[in-house]
Amino acid sequence: MKLHFKSRKLKRQCENPREAQKKYGPKIGTKLTQRVGELESAPSLADIEKIPAARLHRLKGQRSNELAVDLVHPFRLVLKPILEGDADINNLESITIVRIEGVTDYHGKQKR
């Protein structure tokens, strides 16, 4: 799968284990680089859905056009599918490009 990133800083944190652990701590940093590696290796989001621990899920409300995968509870890696050609957000097999929006805890007070 092809990955785009919201910022260069986020790209560095997602691809460099040392940067990820420095920013998010050892547990979340390790899981972040693992998930990004899984995304890069997968041909489409349908393959990520098959990883039980990733728990790919669609978000609701203002984030209804985004998906997320679990990192370390309650943190998630938020993804925005980039739809090209006949790609459809409801057909995970057709989504081969995603933009990584960030690592966040969107539960509780930080919910938008």
Image: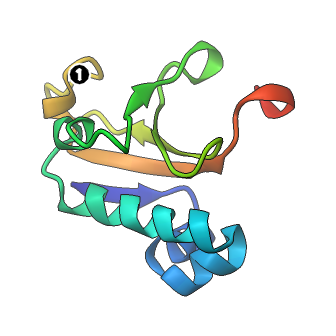
Residue 17, percent from left and from top:
50, 81
Label 1 environment density (alpha carbons within 10 Å; few <14, some 14–19, many ≥20)? some
Above-or-below relation of 43 to 68:
below
* Residue 89 appears left or right of 4: left
* Amino acid found under the numbered disc labelled 1: Asp
Above-or-below relation of 41 to 59:
below
- What residue sits 30% from the left and 39% below the top? 52
Please tell me whether mark 1 sits on a helix, a strand or a loop: loop
- What residue sits 70% from the left and 41% below the top? 105
In the foreground, 13 or 84: 13
Residue 99, percent from left and from top:
43, 49
In the foreground, 54 or 102: 54
Residue 60, percent from left and from top:
56, 16
* Residue 73 appears left or right of 109: left
* Residue 17 appears left or right of 98: right
State the image quarter where residue 15 is shown: bottom left
